[in-house]
Image: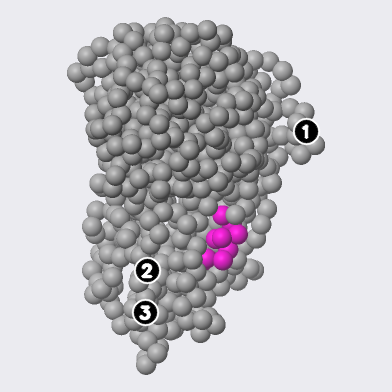
Amino acid sequence: MQFHHHGYVSGDPRVQPAAGVGINRPAELPDEVDVLIVGSGPAGMLAAAQLSQFPNVTTRIVERRPGRLAIGQADGIQTRTVETFQAFGFAERIIAEAYRITETVFWKPDPADPSRIIRTARTPDDPAQISEFPHLVVNQARVLDYFAEFMANSPTRMAPDYGFEFRSLYVADEGEYPVTVTLLHTSGPNEGQERIVRAKYVVGADGARSKVREAIGCTLAGDQANHAWGVMDVLAVTDFPDIRIKCAVQSGTGGSILLIPREGGHLFRMYVDLGEVDPSNKGAVRSTSIEEIIHKAKEILHPYTLDVRDVAWHSVYEVGHRLTDRFDDVLPGERGARTPRVFITGDACHTHSAKAGQGMNVSMQDGFNLAWKLGHVLEGRSPESLLSTYSEERQVVAKNLIDFDKQWSTLMAKRPEEFENPSELEDFYVRTAEFPAGFMTEYAPSMLVAPANHQDLATGFPVGKRFKSAPVVRVGDTNPIHLGHHATADGRWRIYVFAEPALPGTGSATDTFAEWLATSPESPLAATPSDADPDAWFDVKVIYQQPHTEIGINAVPAAFKPQVGPFKLTDYEKVYATDHRADIFELRGLDRGGVVVVVRPDQYVANVLPLTATAELGAFFAPLLQNRRPAEVSPAALPSVPAALINS
């Protein structure tokens, strides 16, 4: 974490100075906003948290509840999501309080006595070491709390506006605030009264029964599996030996349980198989009592006992797989003719079973994908056409998720005797581990993702997939760190320059590339406003192949050592060397001749290029940048942003 760059900071460095719309932020919901987010679930809160980093963008998030969520229904936090939490600065803290999944245990009927269950297999949770972060379980309400804290500490001082329910919206053909939204006060002195808010953009993060989705004419299409599950978070006494380990239990008498231990050391969740649903009388299964769910769980766990002492929460649901054909308000015939004004995220777009732990995780990635794009457009960094990529990218991801969940939920509902291969369930779990972990997302070529013409230069950073971090050593202070952990959710593009073997200051290809970045009008850095810090829009880092002891920091080009803040202090935290214990060039298949890796603000690799491909790099960014300033001088010499706009 960097601070003190515009004066001594004695308080919590996570609290950024108020700036832009955060200065004297009105407590009451304004009549006009740039972005109105409807729903404070995971997708909405992440989107709001990302937009809170854009000081000149007025974002408000409304929620029908009168206050914070007390008990959340989602709890599984996949490793890709923990990587995202790292960008928002709270990965370490949430890891400390969460339950950590290290393996999954499979239980099946005892062949000698099918009325009893026995442990048949154990599988490590991440055998391929997909990520340096763990797979967690933590209450959804705590996730929302962390995002709320991040928002409150942001330059915009954002906070949810509770007690507002979405009723309707209308999109005009013109006007600065073309979306008119009708809200209803659900609590407080104005309860029952309507409120009109006009917005430039609206984000519907209002769940599976989304009224925003309905307002833009989208419908969820798909099927019901006609199979019901009871889910309960309980405190209980049991002699089941794996009660603190994630388990998939299949009984000989029929029915199964997915057991998820919860944070805190005592609570656990059970998804209990309630069997097939009669399509003509679905109300019967939906009225299943908690006593019936507990009784069914006891039957499945035989010969082990289960004495439930307290029920924190329970529900009954049917597996359904539904998806919308678009994630915004632009009809198919209008594509290319206009840009979207209304978007939907999370459960408003896609619904599926809860047993793969995907709902909250995929929803948050929806919010991450959309929010930085809105910020760039509203700040004038990028053209409105950027917003059309949201639906194009995320609809494909949701379709893949639903296809996966159909397979997983079908396998979980099978009786043991229905499997052709006794190990089919655990084999599928291991074989597909990368998908639920969140690492199979691969965005197709677009204005944001270049064709993988030079992929052979960086085989470990596939274009379109998330940037997989690796260890390096920071030259300035000799600290070993993970390179990706310094990519914060600040809305900036990342340009990682992996140098060829030459040392800095020797006229190398890396030196030449750095000079082009700093001085060429075709460089993406030329778009950075003249009154901003030189790294305000682009975070440029260099990684040398030599040990840190061989890198002369004074010889490193100025493009990798920007001068920031009102005192124009040198930033020494963008220059790295290889870690001899884990060489990033070997780990990620990086060409020793040097390579440039471009990463989007949401941590996905956008381009891989040789050091000499400056024209290609400039051409890639040209349609993404609204304006370019003349670049007669090095960015290090540019004036900085006022202190109030800088993170301290």
Question: Can I make out residue 337 in this image?
Answer: yes
Q: Residues within 10 Å of mark 2 (few under 14, many from 20)?
A: some
Mark 2 falls on what kind of element?
Answer: strand
Image height check: is 335 above or below 519? below
Mark 3 falls on what kind of element?
Answer: strand
Residue drawn at (45%, 66%) of the image: 430
Residue placed under numbered mark 2 in the picture: 123
Q: Which kind of residue does numbered mark 3 sit on?
A: Thr
Q: Nearer the viewer, mark 3 or mark 1?
A: 3
Q: Nearer the viewer, mark 1 or mark 2?
A: 2
Residue placed under numbered mark 1 in the picture: 334
Can you name the residue that lies furthest to the bottom here? 112
How far across and how far down the image is residue 547, in percent? 29, 37
**Magenta segment range?**
401-409
Image height check: is 110 above or below 182? below
Q: Nearer the viewer, residue 21 or 549?
A: 549
Question: Can I make out residue 380 in this image?
Answer: no
How far across and how far down the image is residue 344, in percent? 59, 38
Q: Which mark is residue 120?
A: 3
Q: Which kind of residue does numbered mark 2 sit on?
A: Thr
